[in-house]
Every structure is written in C-alpha cells, then in structure tokens.
Image (cartoon, rainbow, N blue to C red):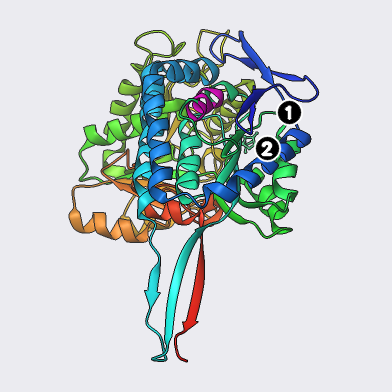
Amino acid sequence: MLYINGEWRKSNSGETLEVYNPATGELIDSVASGGREETREAIESAKEAFKTWKRETGQKRGKYLARVVAKMKDKADDIAKTITMEMGKPLPDAKREVGGAIAYLDWYAEEAKRIYGETIPASHPDKHLMLLREPVGVTAAITPWNFPASMITRKIGPALAAGCTVVLKPAPSTPLSAIKVFECFHEAGLPKGVANLVIGPAEEIGDEMTENPDVRKLTFTGSTNVGKLLLRKAANTVKKVSMELGGHAPLIIFDDADLDAAVQGVLVTKFKNSGQTCISTNRVYVAESIAEEFGGKLAEAAAKLKVGNGIEEGIDVGPLINSQALEKVESHVDDALRRNGKVLCGGRRSENTIGNFYEPTVINYAHDDMKISTEETFGPVAPIFTFKDETEIIERANHESYGLAAYCFTKDLGRGHRMMKELEYGIVGINDPAPIVPQAPFGGIKESGMGKEGGKSGLLEYLEEKFVSISTGN
Ligand code: ADP
C-alpha cells in the first residue's frame, strides 16, 4: 500500500509489485506500485502539511516522534520478522536493527526541542544580528534494502524533528518493512501529509522527486552510481542534498593487536548482514609477522558460522539479496583465485541452492591488483592482505575514491592516534568494530557521500540558516 496524505491507498493504475523471500525464493506478498503521478500527489500533500508542521513547537514535534517510538516498540517483533522475510538477515540481527531504528527516532524526539539559533556580535552599537535555524521544507528520501527499517528512521527522525515533511521511497525489494514503519507513524496520529510513502519503479519516482521544485531536500542512501545520477538531477533545482554512498573499508591489524578481538572484529564487520553493508570490511590488512596465525584463526571462526534461513534459530549468516548479488560475489572470488589467492574457508555457494546463499569465505594472499581490493563486494568474503610497516599501510589503506569507514586494531595508544588522523574516512573504529550510535555523525568523505546522519550534524542537514540583521537605532 501507498501512504499519501494520511491514507493507505492503491496506486492510480492498480499496478502491484511482488516481494520475494531471498532465503526460499517464495512470494511473500504483493503491494501497490505507484509512479510519477502518485509521487507528485505525495509531494503536494507534504507541501501542504509543511505549512503547519513547521509552525509546531519543537516540543510538540518531539512528542509526536515519541509516540511513534512507543508504537515501534509494540510492533518490534513483527517488524523484525518482516525484515528477515524480505531481505534475509537472521532474526536476532533484524531485532537489533529495529532497536537501532527506534534509537534514532528516540534521539531525535529529544533533539526536536533543542534546535537553537544564535546571536552574533554586531559591528555597530545599533544593530542586532541573529541566526535562525529553520526547516528546509519538503524532503524526498530514498532508502536501500540492506537496513530496510533503520535507514528510514535515520532520515525521517531528524527531518520531522527539524520541521520538514517527507516523501519516502524504499527499495523495491523491501517495501513491507517500510509499510510496517509507516503503520507506526499512522497509528501515532501524525498529522496527515507529514510523512508519505510511495513504492514503485525507482527511476520514475526518482525523476519526480528530483525534478519537482517543491522538493527542497533530497536524502539518499545507496550505491555511488545512483547517488551521482541523483546529484546531477537535483542540480537543476539546486536542492539541498545528503548522500550516503558506497564504501570500501579497510580493517588493519598490527602485530601488537589482541588477535582474538581482531578476529571478532572481522566476523562482525564482514559477515553480519552477509557483508551487505556500506561499512562492511572489504580489505583485511594483517602485519606480515602474524598473518599466518591470524588467517588460521579467522578461517576457523568463519567456518563455524551457520548459514541458512534467518527465520530459523541459530543462524549467523543469511542469504544475499538476489541472484545478481550472488554472481558478483562469485566473480570477485573467481578473480582472486585466478590471481593466486587461496581459499582458507568457504569460496563457494552454500549447499542450500534454493536461496541466494554463499558460504562465509576467507581468502589468503590477496593483493592490490585483485578486483576485491578496490570494488565493493557486498558479500561474505574476507580477503587477507599483508603489510610490513605503518607508513606502507597508511598509503594502501586510503582508497582512491571511497572514504566511509575504516577499522584498526592495535594496543599501542600512540599508533591508534596516528591512525585516527591518517585514515581518510568519515568513520574510524580503533579496536572497535561497531562504532555506530544515534548520537554520533555517520557519513563518508570522497565519493562515499556528503552530509551526515545521526547526532547534531544529522539534524543540521534538515535546517537552513537564516541571518537577520536588525537596525535598532531611530
Ligand atoms: P543497491 O545496489 O544497494 O540496490 P541502489 O543505489 O541501486 O543500491 O538502490 C538504493 C535505492 O535507490 C533504492 O531505493 C533504489 O530503488 C533506488 N534507486 C535506484 N535507481 C534509482 C534511480 N534511477 N532513481 C531514483 N532511485 C533509484
């Protein structure tokens, strides 16, 4: 169903979109699929709603968001099950995602009442200078399938807190989680038109979102190529834009690191979500002197991960989203093996051939001319590269075009600080494979994106600064 102007409805054409379970290939449901026309209607309703929503106090907007939080808590298990069914992650991970989705809303429910302006010292005794922070306006949001609930709240939470109204387009493979999240908005009694949901063909909806001059803000999470395309399109109406794009995270293990913690670090950053995360580790760099030992430990741990349908108990790694994703992973592994890489574990599709399963894979003797060393794999494959010293690894760890997340394991405090400064990434985890929290800014540099989500910076993305100069003299 589409959700426009506070109502659940079908598309004008009556067209639908089918949703499949990547673990079983089964049809789960079919939902209404709208296009340009419905997107235009949603934008109109958001424009109308903006007139009153922007005038509400921050406190009141925060209270609405708090009500959504309460609804989401009530429905958490149901939303988590939907996530697992339509994109495959194991149920406990889906529950963690819903927890994260709620945490973002909760944070911004609080922040709504803390949007301050500033006074600026004047250069004349009879002048009063002020900076106001005001909502940007109608926001178009486009989200991906890999975190089908939390990517939504990470955008809608700060947008609504700031006083913007929203039209959201989720990924076509995961509309059901989006519908569940929007049910919470609906049941929380959000005024009509404040949050709208359109589901359907990406390009059609995207074209309306980028071309319509009433949309003043575009926020996107997805691939770098689509991000660049949307940036070009949004340029015609000079929209305010935030982009969370691809990544190619290095994870560096120095010879003084706690090896068991580093193994855990790779398990978390590489095999969670089957490696389908923009902050997933893509390159594991291990100091030469400990590489054999580390490779053995990692392969032993990865081989123990249980692959299967995430709705069943005890599953660590679910399916990939679709057959193209599986083929991409295979092509990266084939290329690595052709160039003398060696499989330490996995290296093939799982025996369960119905779903899109690939075994957790560790590849030894990786080097810089393999595809895997520069292209995003988006799958459960950990290539191990070796390095000799800090100067060399800083050079190699920084990517030509990506700059989202980087991880480093060392017990040397000075080295940790040096790495923190030298790594050209928007997020750096030192001995920490899980650095993401709602109160901190998430976002990349270089071609990994622009703008932040989370924390105070996340809120500023939905605010414009207005400077006012008042002459107080007679
Ligand atoms: P992925 O490869 O992870 O699916 P995409 O960038 O293709 O990443 O998808 C992320 C989101 O962008 C999805 O909601 C998808 O439907 C949307 N999308 C893809 N192509 C376009 C487009 N041309 N215009 C607008 N949205 C698009």
- Residue at the image point whose x is 43% and y is 79% from the top: 129
- Residue at the image point whose x is 54% and y is 36% from the top: 191
Q: Quadrant of the N terminus?
A: top right
Q: Residue furthest front?
A: 474
Residue stretch in magenta = 178-186
Residue 48, placed above or below residue 146? below
Q: Which residue is mark 2?
A: 42
Give amino acid for label 1.
Gly
Q: Which label belongs to residue 104? A: none
Question: Which secondary structure dominates the residues rendered in magenta?
Answer: helix
Q: Spatial distance from mark 1 to mark 2, Cα to Cα?
A: 11 Å
Disc 1 crowd, CA 10 A, few/some/many (<14, 14-19, 20+) = many
- Residue 321, percent from left and from top: 57, 23
Q: Is residue 396 visible?
A: no
- Residue 435, percent from left and from top: 32, 42
Residue 223, placed above or below residue 413? above
Q: Which residue is mark 1?
A: 34
